[in-house]
Structure formats: C-alpha cells, structure tokens
C-alpha cells in the first residue's frame, strides 16, 4: 500500500468514526460501504482540501440524497450548505446529482453549467451498485464491484460552482440540469430502438426498385449506414416520415430520443426542402439548425434514409439525428464510405497525372478537407473548390468559398488565406464582413494550419432565418484581399499619393517597420500617413510633446467617437488619461496603445480610444475639435483643473478658459460657504448649459475690453438672464445660477482678458465689491481680490482703499479664506493705529505633497507667492509722476485704486524682497515700499518690534498689579521657542523672567524652579542668536532639578516631584498633550504666546468653532487659566470669547491685535517713510544709497514712535477699564451707534448685548478689556475714515500732526516734503484719531458727538485746540514718566482728571466756536491767557477751594508725585472754567485776571460749585439721562458765565465784592429764591433730575434779570 492510499484510508476511517455514533448499529456497515463507495475515486488532493468537519457534514448530505430514491428521474439539489442546518459549510454553491449510471450524464451537466456562465471549481462522482425497497429506501450497497449494465447502478455527483446567494438563480440551475438529464434519458432509453431503425432501414433498402438500387452510390450509401452503426455516430434522435402528394407527414409515435421533445425540431421548417429529398438516392445529408445540448455543444448532423415506391417516387423514410464520433474527425476521410468514393471520383475528374505533384497536392487538400463539407458538397462543387485552392496555394492568394446548408439555415464559408497574414483579426474581420450581408445568429469556426502556404478558416454560420438571395462571393473575396494586403506596401503607396515619391521614400524607410502589427491590423495605410504627419510635427516642435485628434469614425452600420493621442515622452498611464476623459464627459469603451519606433528617432506612442458620450445623438466632434484639443492639452499640462466642470466643453460648447472662469467663481463660492459642493455646482451648470452660455456672455460683455457694453446694457442682460431663470423649477439650481450672475456683477475688475506678449496669465484674479455680494461671511469688507489657478488659490481682503496687512502662506486648503477672514478681523483692530485700514491675504499652494524635500517645498511655495503677488498687481492702478495709470486690458468699475501694500506673515516672513522685486520690475510706484521689511527695510525680528510692543502690554498689566517686570522676577510659561521672532524677542525683554516652561511643535521645555536668572537670560540670548536652534539645544546644566526637554512625540513623560509642585500635577506620568494642557492651566504670573495655534477657547465654544484641529486635544478654556497676565505676541492664541471669559475671571489681557500692533505700525511707518524718500530720490535730492542710509539710521527713532503708540493705546484701554462701570452707558451708546451704522457686527466680535450690558451695570461692573480693545479700534477706524474723507489736512494747524508720525530727524530735514506726502490727509487723520482715542478713551468721540451733534472734523479741531490750550501732551508725559515710581492707581486718577478737564474743554469749544473752529486761532486766543490766569489761581480761589487745592496737593505729594507736577495737576475743574472766564474777558475786552476774580467770587457767593457737585451726583442709568446731565452742566456754566458778564459790566475800580453786591441787590428777590433753592438742593444726598431742572430754571431767571 502506497502512502497516498494509506492517507486516504485514514481519512475515510476518520469520517466513519466521526459519523457512526449518529447512525443505528444496523446501518453502520451500510454507512461504511457508502463512505468507501462515494470517495473511492476521489483524489487525495480533493479530500485533504476539505476540512474534516466539513467532509463529515458533506458525507451526511450525500447520504441523505442516496438513502431514498425511486431510481427513475434524476434527483438534483442546488444549495449553499449552512453550518447550523447541514453542519458543514463551503465557500461555493453545491450541486448534488443522483441519477442512473448512463452515458452522457457528466458531459451534459458540464455543458448545462456553462450556459449559466458559472465556474466549476470541483467535481467528483461515484458509481454505486444499490439494492432498494419498493419505496426507494436503500437496503444494500456494493461499491467494490460495479456493472455498468446493471440497471441498479446509480451515479452520484458532487459539484462545486461559483457561490450564488440568489435562491431563484439556484432554482434555475436545478431546473436546467433536470431538463438536460431528462433529455439524456430520452436518448439513452431509445438508443437501441434508434439503432434498430437504422438496421431496419438497411433491410428495407434491399427492396428498393431497380432504378434506385442501380444507382452507383446505392451500395456506398448502404455501406455508409453500416459504418455509422459501427460506433461512428452518436444517435440523438430518430423518427419516420411519409410523403404523399408532395407533403411530408410525420409518422405518429415514431419519434425517438430528442425528437420526442416538442421543442426540438418539431417545426417542419427543419426538414430539408422536398426537392432535395426527391433526389433518387438512398441517403441525404444535412444539418440541424438547433443545438443539441447533449454530449457536445454542436449543431447535430441529419441523415435522411429515404424509401421509394416501385415507380421510384419518394414515399417516406427515416430522419436520423446525431453527432459523428471523435474518431471520424481524427482519422482520414478516405476510409469513410461515400466520402472516400467521392474523393476518388474528384481525383479522376481533375485530369491530373496519377502520382504527379499536382495530383499529390490535390489529394492532400481533399484529405484535409472537413468531413461535413465532403459529405454535404456535390462532386462538381468540390472539384471546382479544391482545384481553385490548388492554384491559390501556389500564388499565395486568398480564396473564398460559400454555400448554404440545412434548408438554407446555415452558411458554410471556407477562407484560404496566406499563412503569414492569417491571425485572429483576419477571422474577426471576415466575420464582420459577412455580418454585413447576412443576419448571423451564431458561428462555429475551425482553423487548419499545415505546411501549406495557405491557412484554412472554416466558418459555419447559423442564420436567424433561411438565407434568401445570392451569396456575394466575389465581392467578399475582393474585400478580404484588400484587408489582408501587406500593410507596408499600402503605406508606401499612400505616402507617394500624399507627399510625392522623393519624400515618400524617405518616410517609408523611416516608418516601414515603425508601426506594430496591432496598429497595422486596426488602421489603414492612409490613416497612418496622417498619423505620421502629426508625429513629424511633434518631432519638429520644441515645446510640444503631445498632439491629438478628436473625430468620429464612420463605419458600415455604426459610427463611434474616437480620440487619437500622440505622445513623445514615453508611455502614458491609462489611470492618468481616463480621469481627464471622464471629466470631459467621455467614457473609454476601448483603448489601444501603439508603440511607434521610427528609425533614428525616439520611441513615439499613439493611443487610440473608442469613446462613449452620453449626449451622442447628433453630436459632431468636428464642431468641437479645437475646443476639445485645446482643453485636453490645457488639462494635461496643468493649465486647467481636471474636474467635472470640463464637461461643459462638449456639453455647452465653452472653451476651457471660460470654464476656468466659471470654476474660479465656484471655488470662491466654496470659500464664502455658499453651501454647494464643487461637483454639485458643476452638475447644475451642465444641466443648464443654455444659461451657462448667457452667464459667460455676461462676463465677456462686462470685462472684455474690446467688447464692453454700457452699464445699462449689462443690467438689461443681467435682468434677462434672471428673468429666464424663473423657468428653473429646482430652487437649489436656481440659487446656484443666480449666484454666478451676482458674483459677476459684483466683480469690479479682472485680469481675465489681460495678455502679456500675447499670452494669458496662468491665473485669474477677480476684484469683488463686498457690498454687492449677498450672504457673505462677516465681516463684510470693502474689497476683495480672489485669485484662482490650478496651482494655487488666494484671497486678499481689504477694509478700504488704503489698507495694509500681511500675506500668509496658508496650509488650510479647504477654508483658507475663513482663516484670512479671522485674521483680517484682528487686522482691522490692529490697523487702527496706522494710516491704512485692515487688510489680509493668504494663498494655498495646491501642488505640495509630503514627499517633497524642504528645497522643493519652498521653491513651489515661492513660485505660488510670486504668482499671487503678480495677480494682485495685474489689476492694481499705478502712479507715474503723480498721474494715475490704469492696468492694461482691465475694465474697471471702481474708483482709482493705486494703494496696494503687503507685509510678511506666517510662511512669508522672508519673502519681502521677492515681492519688492516684482513691484520694482513692474515699475510700481511704491517700489520697495510695496512690501515692508526686506533688504532695505526694517527687520522686525532684529528690531524685536512686535515682541517689544506686546511686552509694553505686559508691563502695563503688571504695573497695575504693583510689579515692575524689569526689576522683579515673574514666573512665565511660553508658547514658542527662542528661534522665533515674537517668542525669542519677548523672552529677552527682561532679565527677571523665570521661564518655567515652554513648548513648540517639537519639544516641551521644563525648568520648574530656575535660580540663575542672569545665566538663563544669557542662554536664551545664545539660542536666539544661533540660527535654527530648538529647545533641545538649551544648556541642560542650567535647568533646575526635575526639569528637562521632552519630545512631543513621546508616548509619555514622567512627572518629577518638582514638576508636580510647580504645575500642580497629580499624576506620575502624563502624555505630552496632557502636560501642555496642564501648563496652560498652571498658576503663574505670565502666559506668553509667541507661537502659532489657538490654545484657549471659552466654555461656550466647541473645538470646531475654533478652527484649529491640530490643537483640539490640548486646548483649554479661558475659565481654567490661572495665570495673572497674558501677553499675546502671536496671533489667534486665544479666541475672543476666551479672552472675555478669562477677563471675567480676573485675568488681565487685551487682544492679540492690541498687543502685537507694533509690527504693523512699524511696517506702515516704513512704507510712508519710503514714499517720502522715494519722491526725493525721483527729484534727484537723494540717491538710493542715501535713502537707504536714512532708513537705517532712523531705526531707533522709528522703534520709539511705534512703541509709544503701543504704550498709549494700552494705557487708554486700561483707563477705560478702570472707569468701566461709571462709563458703561457710554459704551452701550458707542456699541449701538457702531451697530446702527453697519460698521459693527455685535455677534461676530462677541460684543455684549444690551441685556448683558445691563447685567454688568447692575452688578457694578464694566465691559472687559478685550471688549474695550475691539471698540477702541472700531471707534478709531471710523474717525480715521471720516477725517480722511473730510480732507483734514487742509487745516494748516492740523496738518502739522503729520510731523509727529515721522522721526524727528526726518522732520527737521524734510518738513516741507512731509506736507507734500501723497498720503498726507490719511496720515493726519490717523495721527489725530490715534492721539485722541489713546488719550481720551474709546467713548470720548461718541459722548461729545452725541451731546453736541458735531462732526468728526469739528470734534478733531476742538479736541486738538483743547489739548494744546491745556498743554495736555506735556502733562501726560510727566505722569507717564512716573511709571513704577508711584502707584498705578494714582497715575490713573491724575490722568482721568486731565481727561475730564479736556473732555469738558472740547465740548465747550464745540458749543462756543462751532461756526469757526480754527485751531490756531483758538490756541492763540486762549492758551497764553489761560496759563497766566492759572498761575494766579491761588489768589483767585475762595478759601474753601484753596483748602481743597491744598488737600489735593498734599495727597499727590504723599503718593510720590513731584510737587511741580502736582501743582500743575490740581484744580482741573477750575482750570477748565478759565475758558469761560477768558471768553468773557475777550468779549468785554477786560483783563482776564479781573474776569477770573468776578467768576470765582460769584461762584462762591451763589454756591455754584456746590450745585455742580450735586449735578455730578445725578444717577445716570441711560444714554438720555447722561445727555440730560451734560445739558444741565452746560446750563450751569452758561448761567455762571452770564452772571460773570453782568457783574463785570457794573464793576468800578476793580472792586469785585461791591460790584457783586450791587448786582445781587438789584435782583434781591430772585437771589433769595436761588439761595433757598441751593440750600434745599445741597441738603439732598442723591438729587433728582426734576429738582435740578427747577434749580437751574431759577438760576436762569436770575442770570437773565
């Protein structure tokens, strides 16, 4: 026993052992026999591939099939075994068949399964000799000895096929097999009867008439029947027919085998025509026009065995149907009766010499002829055919023979083709050619190849219906000769025809072997000539490597869209090509690549595509040839995006640049959150291609400089489109189409039609007017430039015509505009300190990928930056010698707009020189002032300007806490590293910084308890000075115990005891993310943000609201912060709501826009200085080198000016905060005013609602510093804008404010030139606005304007006059010089007193001099007199006032205020009153000293100061009450002024007391009433408005008397 047998035995025994427990003991022997029987012939490979458990389950399933069967009708089961039900499983569907063990079963089942297109994975079967009861139950089974002739032999089959879960499909398979096996049973059961019929027919033939018997072929036919019976014919069916009166009738009950079936050859049309059957021969050969799906898939042969009467008339016969056995086809036809005789006759009739060469050749041809053809053809036809083949063989000529068979339901074609030309394509072309002349239903083919020169193709064609007409043999043969002609010969002929002989010969030598056989098989030589021309043109081109042809191939009964691509630089990937074609609306049905190899040239590739187009009806590619070709090449070379918008090329007939324009608008829609995906918009446009054409026409009409129409016509065109859109039923589609129209009409400039040297730019820029765009994310700005390119996209948002801000290289490809919009919001606030309003830009480079190295990454980013800058400049006006030059080929729908400046930002910090070079190359009027910084600008990192500005805010906050950060240590945690500008410079602002921790994107630095602060400072300085350092470079020796530098990529970080104590950490181990969150929440002095990212949100925000996914896992809430102060050197470190939340919980912070405003201030100052100096250069007053020297030497002065602005702005916010509750109604009024004017979106800036302000007020609180910061900036921006519009610089005195902007050295040298600055008005407006709000606070302008109704210009003039009259700048500077010397609270009080005095003075000037507000004149009239009177105040004041003055001086000196300053700052109320005094003196032309004596004496006598104090006590719960109190104060002042004037008019010899006494005596009764009123009013602790109004009415009566 070999190993395999032993293994098989083990498996079978294992199955038996596993199953026997499930069977009764009496059946176990039967089970063992069953197992051995069914698996006896199964290969060991099949058995071992089935799991033992599944094999056992399979055995049980087969047992169930065999156990009960009555043994007649085959038992078929098709199922998917289930573990729960069958206790086994398979990955395939299972078929089991139990049938009689008869022939043809297995072959027929396989044929049947093929018709269901399912794969057969495994089949095995067993023959079982069984004994069953009458009911079919299995009794005995003998698997060892099987007699196939035994009727009790069963055949059991197991088959695995492709799994199908469809029960209906499984049922179809089951029914098909059952039907097929029923047919097998019919054939097998009747097989003997059919043989007997043939034998009987032979006997009957012996009785035929002499006419029939004497026919030469009679005996041959009888022999043929004997030959058939000798196992050369498989009988499938047989019946008997009779012929009477030329009518064929089937003999009843004569049908045997398949002919018993009603669906097989039951129609009389399957009989050959009676005329053929009437031929006086014993046999007639034919074919069945219906496949018999038994044993073989074939059309069976029919042999008619005819019977004649004595007259030789056909009276009937047998019709025998079957298949010749395989031995017939493998043997020689010479030995077949009939055929051998026929061949012998043909050879004789050929006339060829016996044994000669031609005789042997002819014999060979006949010997290899198909048996069916030899049977079915007559001798004459065969002779003609084989002789023709003999001659064609010598000449290697193509030869064709056609004939019909089987009652003309078949056409048999014999095609002889030169062997070297024959291939599958020839056969297919032959079939295709035949299909044009007949209705082909099915075909069978045989190919015969021998040593002959000719290959033979035999094609049997089953027709859908009997063939009618003549077979066009000659025409088909001619066409086949053309098809199989040698291709290179045709090529030369075609080249000569097109190029002449000389050129043709050269090209033939080059290309005769260049085209592969597959190309030659598919394309004619004429087409190749055209392709050669295209290939040659690409060889000659220096810049093109691809060409194409889009056309429709016209073929017999059909036509198809074709695309032929020609490519020089190597093979193309189909995966690259198909997306391009699909986005053009085309599907690739077929693709054939051809490698063309011309001699002495590089390899060329030709791709032939058969395309499908959804709108193919009536589509003529010729009309789209240029559009398609240009678009395809543009897409391929990345000049256009590859997306569904390209379907509009064929769908709407629009060229690719117009589609790029539409795509750009769609991209912009995405950025403004329109709500429709890019693909959805593309589909809508495609569905409404007619409207799309109108939209494109509108764009062309608006911006094509050669076809521009008037605005009225544009509006008419717009209205016509919108009217047409009313017919669009789908609301979403209507919205999208209308949005395109809206955006086009909102576009005010575009470079779309601009060309440079005849070439369009690789990008499209659009300038939008935000006022014309609905539903745009807020804030709504003045202008926006959107730039689209396949390579990059970008936006530049501007708050006004003079605006500035950085351009950042964004990494937010999906929502970069949202990022920029958030930044421009902060920039608007930040730019309140400079001339331009806020602007911000950003771009994304779309070709970046993670595989790029740093150099490639930067190169691509810089290239995109250059294009973005160019796109902005393309549509920006220029200036030359003061004259405006609009951009070429750009239609403008806005005012002149030459001011465009940019600045460095994230990712573009070193790009300023690049931008300036572009501007200089274009002769842009700003030259290198276009982008601040750069080689000839101020290096912000070197200056440390941004960090120093933010540090001023930090100093301010700590000074209010009583800490001098320059002298006292403060604990700090930072965001960033020392290599960064803001972080590095910030951490060098003080040597007293105790940097406990810091983190960037790579490391976490921990120093829990730094001791050597000076050494730590020096180490930070070293890191800052050393390029490309990180925290890992920090000197570990300086890090205190328990600290270190940790990787953010670490899995976890151990927490030392020192760390736990310093940062209040409870865990012993934390992740880097957890540690950063804990650091942010640590209890420290200062949290310094000098990095990138948003790390703090509010409790009311979720992480998605923040828009910084990278830091979601570590972000904390503002309420969780425990630091005392936050310094925001970097942008967006906190959300605004987080700042407010932090402030509400007691933290001190402004906003990022306030803290880091120094950077933008420095940049703007640089631009303004460069504009000034460049004018001097252009005049020849300076050289460029001298200009650059000027810039360099003014660095420190520029820094001083900038930081002073930061100082004053931070101070203003703090002063407003400390007066917050007192002025909360003013803030409410300012907020509401800004909102009503449409300048403020309350929700967008997170400004408290009216209800929230009321809650703050009731709680005794004011608004937070972050809110004040925002409102201060809004107020500044509004005033700055209005003053510039009012041409503030026309006032000569105010124009001098511009001198304060520039460094002192520059002013001294070029004072006149400063007053000729192109931006003088804007500079003055900015300076006045800054100065006013930085000193007076955010609500000052609102309060004055709401109470007086003055304009911004009037307010500015009045305030500047008041400021200078009272010498406010000097006084403020002296107070500020006391920083860290006296209490911050004292400084605040002194400043607030000054502010109140100047506020009253400003209001007084507006009311008194509104009609003629001349600053210079007012100052001249009031300043000197006021100073003189003020010096004499101690002599003028009453005793009570003097005591108050003395107390004020004493308190100031005790607080540390120097006495000279304290003297200047006392009696601010009285100082303000001097305005009225001097006004009276000027009116009466008397000495102001005298007027002052009268004023203060009268005030004392009438107790007017007491009344003023009572008015100040009036509760102000609303804006109107505030105005009412202001009005009462005014009334009090005006009445006091009138009384002073009246008393002065009666004075004699400067006796003030007597003059007053005389005046009061004249009005005694009124005076008495007043004194009583004063007594009553003074006795009230909280006065009422009504009481004060009555008192003032009494005073009015007194003053008028």
Image (tube, grey):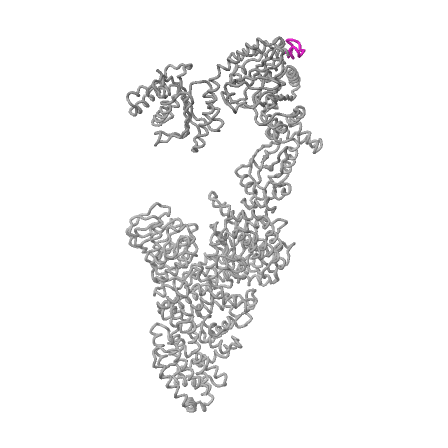
Instruction: Look at the image and say whether residue 1457 sits in the magenta stretch.
Output: no
Which percent across, then down, holds residue 122?
A: 42, 25
Left or right of residue 639, residue 1565 in this image: left
Which percent across, then down, holds residue 368?
A: 59, 16
Q: Quadrant of residue 594?
A: top right
Nearest to the observer: residue 418 or residue 653: 653
Q: Which image quarter is the C terminus in?
A: bottom left
Residue drawn at 47 percent across, 72 percent down: 1346
Question: In the rendered image, is residue 1551 in sight?
Answer: no
Left or right of residue 1348, residue 628 in this image: right
Which percent across, then down, holds residue 148?
A: 42, 15
Left or right of residue 361, residue 674 in this image: left
Q: What stretch is highlighted in magenta?
A: 346-359
Nearest to the observer: residue 293 or residue 1496: 293
Q: In which quarter of the image is residue 273?
A: top right
Which percent across, then down, holds residue 372?
A: 58, 17
């Amino acid at each position: 026993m070999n190993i395999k047998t032993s293994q098989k035995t083990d498996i079978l025994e294992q199955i038996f052992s596993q199953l026997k427990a499930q069977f009764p003991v009496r059946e176990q022997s039967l089970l063992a026999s069953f197992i051995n029987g069914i698996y006896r012939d199964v290969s060991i490979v099949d058995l071992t591939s089935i799991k033992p458990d599944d094999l056992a389950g399979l055995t049980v399933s087969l047992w169930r099939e065999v156990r009960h069967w009555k043994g007649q009708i085959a038992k078929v089961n098709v199922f998917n075994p289930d573990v729960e039900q069958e206790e086994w499983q398979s990955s395939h569907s299972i078929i089991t068949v139990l049938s009689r063990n008869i022939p043809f079963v297995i072959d027929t089942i396989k044929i049947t399964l093929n018709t269901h297109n399912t794969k057969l994975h495994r089949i095995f079967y067993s023959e079982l000799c069984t004994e069953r009861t009458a009911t079919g139950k299995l009794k005995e089974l003998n698997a060892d000895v099987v007699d196939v002739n035994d009727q009790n032999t069963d055949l059991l089959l197991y088959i695995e096929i492709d799994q199908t879960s469809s029960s209906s499909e499984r049922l179809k398979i089951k029914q098909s097999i059952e039907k097929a096996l029923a047919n097998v049973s019919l054939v097998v059961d009747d097989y003997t009867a059919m043989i007997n019929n043939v034998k009987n027919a032979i006997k009957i033939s012996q009785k035929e008439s002499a006419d029939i018997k004497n026919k030469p072929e009679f005996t041959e036919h009888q022999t043929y029947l004997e030959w058939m019976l000798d196992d050369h014919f498989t009988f499938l069916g047989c019946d008997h027919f009779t012929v009477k009166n030329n009518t064929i009738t089937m003999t009843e009950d004569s049908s045997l085998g398949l002919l018993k079936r009603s669906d097989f050859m039951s129609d009389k049309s399957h009989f050959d025509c009676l005329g053929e059957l009437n031929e006086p021969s014993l046999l007639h050969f034919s074919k069945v026009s219906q496949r018999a799906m038994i044993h073989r898939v074939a059309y069976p042969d029919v042999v008619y065995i005819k019977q004649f009467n004595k007259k030789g008339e056909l009276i009937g016969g047998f019709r025998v149907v079957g298949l010749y056995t395989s031995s017939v086809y493998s043997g020689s036809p010479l030995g077949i009766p009939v055929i051998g005789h026929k061949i012998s006759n043909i050879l004789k009739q050929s006339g060829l010499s016996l044994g000669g060469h031609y005789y042997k050749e002819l014999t060979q041809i006949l010997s290899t002829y198909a048996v069916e053809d030899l049977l079915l053809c007559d001798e004459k036809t065969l002779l003609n055919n084989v002789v023709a083949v003999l001659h064609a063989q010598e000449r290697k000529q193509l030869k064709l023979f056609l004939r019909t068979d089987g009652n003309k339901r078949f056409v048999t074609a014999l095609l002889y083709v030169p062997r070297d030309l024959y291939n599958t394509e020839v056969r297919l072309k032959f079939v295709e050619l035949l299909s044009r002349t007949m209705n082909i239903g099915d075909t069978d083919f045989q190919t015969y190849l021998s040593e002959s020169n000719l290959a033979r193709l035999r094609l049997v064609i089953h027709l859908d219906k009997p063939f009618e007409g003549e077979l066009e043999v000659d025409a088909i043969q001619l066409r086949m000769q053309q098809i199989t002609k040698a291709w290179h010969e045709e090529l030369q002929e075609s080249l000569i025809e097109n190029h002449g002989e000389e050129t043709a010969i050269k090209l033939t030598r080059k290309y005769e072997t260049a085209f592969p056989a597959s190309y030659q098989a598919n394309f004619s030589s004429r087409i190749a000539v055209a392709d050669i021309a295209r290939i040659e043109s690409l060889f000659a081109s220096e810049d093109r490597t691809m060409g194409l042809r889009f056309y429709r191939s016209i073929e017999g009964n059909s036509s198809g869209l074709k695309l032929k691509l020609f490519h020089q630089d190597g093979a193309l990937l189909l995966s690259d090509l198909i997306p391009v074609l699909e986005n053009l609306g085309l599907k690739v049905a077929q693709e054939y690549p051809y490698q063309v190899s011309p001699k002495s040239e590089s390899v060329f590739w030709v791709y032939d595509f058969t395309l499908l187009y959804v709108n193919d009806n009536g589509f003529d590619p010729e009309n789209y040839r240029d559009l398609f070709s240009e678009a395809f090449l543009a897409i391929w070379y990345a000049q256009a995006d590859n997306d569904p918008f390209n379907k509009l090329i064929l769908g709407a007939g629009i060229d690719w640049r117009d589609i790029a324009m539409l795509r750009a608008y769609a991209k912009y829609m995405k950025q403004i959150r329109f709500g429709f995906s890019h693909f959805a918009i593309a589909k809508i446009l495609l569905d409404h291609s007619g409207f799309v054409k109108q939209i494109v026409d509108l764009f062309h009409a608006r911006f094509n400089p050669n076809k521009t129409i008037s605005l009225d016509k544009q509006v008419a065109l717009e209205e016509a489109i919108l009217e047409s859109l009313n017919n669009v039923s789908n609301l979403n589609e209507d919205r999208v189409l209308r949005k395109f129209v809206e955006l086009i009409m909102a576009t005010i400039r575009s470079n779309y039609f601009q060309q440079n040297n005849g070439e369009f730019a690789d990008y499209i820029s659009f300038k939008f007017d935000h006022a014309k765009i609905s539903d745009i994310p807020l804030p709504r700005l003045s202008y926006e430039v959107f730039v689209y390119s396949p390579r990059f996209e970008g936006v530049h948002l501007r708050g006004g015509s003079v605006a500035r801000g950085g351009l950042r290289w964004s990494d937010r490809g999906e929502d970069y505009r949202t990022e920029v919009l958030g930044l421009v919001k902060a920039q608007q606030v930040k730019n309140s300190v400079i001339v331009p309003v806020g602007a911000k830009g950003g771009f994304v480079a779309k070709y970046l990928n993670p595989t790029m190295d740093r150099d490639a990454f930067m190169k691509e980013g810089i290239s995109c930056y250059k294009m973005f800058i160019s796109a902005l400049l393309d549509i920006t006006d220029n200036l030359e010698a003061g004259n405006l030059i609009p951009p070429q080929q750009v239609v403008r729908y806005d005012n002149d707009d030459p001011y465009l400046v940019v600045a460095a930002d994230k990712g573009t910090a070193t790009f300023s020189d690049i931008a300036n070079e572009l501007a200089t190359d274009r002769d842009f009027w700003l030259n290198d002032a276009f982008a601040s910084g750069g080689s000839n600008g101020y290096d912000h990192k070197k200056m440390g300007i941004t960090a120093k500005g933010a540090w001023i805010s930090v100093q301010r906050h700590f000074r209010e806490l009583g800490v001098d950060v320059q002298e006292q240590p403060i604990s700090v945690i930072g965001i960033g590293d020392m290599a960064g500008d803001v972080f590095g410079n910030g951490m060098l602002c003080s040597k007293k910084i105790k940097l406990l921790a810091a983190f960037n994107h790579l490391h976490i630095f921990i120093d829990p308890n730094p001791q050597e602060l000076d050494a730590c400072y020096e180490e930070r300085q070293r890191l800052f000075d050393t390029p490309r350092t990180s925290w890992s470079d920090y000197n570990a020796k300086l890090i205190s115990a328990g600290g270190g530098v940790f990787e953010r990529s670490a899995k976890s970080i151990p927490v030392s005891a020192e760390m736990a104590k310093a940062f209040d950490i409870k865990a012993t181990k934390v992740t880097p993310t957890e540690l950063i969150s804990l650091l942010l929440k640590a209890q420290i002095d200062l949290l310094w943000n000098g990095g990138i990212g948003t790390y703090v949100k509010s409790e009311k925000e979720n992480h998605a609201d923040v828009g910084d996914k990278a830091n979601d896992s570590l972000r904390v809430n503002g309420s969780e912060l425990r630091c005392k102060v936050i310094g925001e050197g970097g942008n967006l470190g906190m959300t605004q709501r987080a700042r407010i939340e932090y402030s509400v919980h007691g933290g001190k912070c402004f906003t990022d826009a306030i803290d880091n405003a120094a950077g933008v201030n420095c940049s703007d100052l640089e631009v303004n200085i460069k504009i000034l100096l460049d004018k001097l250069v252009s005049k020849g007053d300076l050289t460029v080198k001298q200009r650059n020297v000027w810039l360099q030497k003014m660095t420190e002065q520029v820094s001083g000016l900038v930081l002073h602005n930061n100082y004053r702005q931070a101070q203003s916010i703090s002063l407003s905060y400390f007066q917050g509750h007192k002025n909360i109604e003013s803030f409410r009024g300012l907020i509401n005013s800004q909102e009503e004017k449409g300048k403020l979106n309350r929700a967008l800036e997170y400004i408290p609602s009216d209800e929230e302000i009321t809650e703050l007020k009731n709680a005794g609180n004011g608004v937070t510093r972050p809110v004040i910061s925002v409102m201060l900036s809004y107020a500044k921006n509004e005033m700055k804008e209005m003053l510039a519009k009012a041409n503030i610089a026309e006032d000569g005195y105010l124009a001098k404010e511009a001198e304060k902007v520039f460094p002192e050295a520059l002013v001294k040298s070029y004072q006149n030139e400063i007053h000729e600055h192109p931006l003088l008005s804007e500079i003055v407006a900015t300076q006045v606005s800054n100065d006013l709000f930085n000193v007076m606070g955010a609500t000052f302008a609102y309060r004055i304007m709401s109470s007086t109704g003055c304009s911004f210009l009037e307010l500015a003039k009045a305030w500047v006059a008041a400021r200078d009259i009272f010498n406010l700048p000097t006084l403020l500077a002296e107070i500020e010089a006391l920083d860290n010397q006296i209490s911050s609270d004292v400084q605040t009080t002194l400043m607030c007193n000054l502010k109140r005095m100047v506020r009253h003075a400003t209001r007084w000037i507006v009311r008194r001099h509104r009609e003629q507000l001349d600053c210079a004149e007012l100052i001249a009239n009031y300043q000197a007199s006021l100073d003189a009177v003020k010096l004499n105040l101690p002599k003028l004041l009453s005793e009570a006032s003097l005591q108050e003055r003395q107390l004020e001086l004493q308190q100031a000196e005790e607080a540390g205020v120097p006495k000279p300053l304290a003297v200047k700052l006392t009696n601010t109320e009285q100082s303000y009153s001097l305005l009225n005094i001097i006004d009276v003196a000027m009116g009466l032309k008397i000495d102001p000293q005298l007027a002052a004596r009268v004023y203060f004496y009268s005030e004392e006598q009438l107790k007017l100061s007491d009344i003023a104090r009572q008015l100040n006590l009036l509760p102000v719960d609303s804006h109107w009450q505030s105005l009412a109190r202001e009005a009462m104060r005014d009334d009090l002042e005006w009445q006091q002024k009138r009384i002073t004037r009246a008393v002065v008019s009666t004075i004699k010899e400067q006796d003030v007391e007597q003059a007053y006494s005389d005046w009061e005596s004249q009005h005694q009764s009124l005076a008495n009433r007043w004194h009583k009123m004063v007594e009553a009013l003074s006795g009230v602790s909280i006065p009422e408005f009504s009481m004060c109004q009555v008192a003032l009415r009494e005073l009015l009566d007194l003053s008028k008397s």
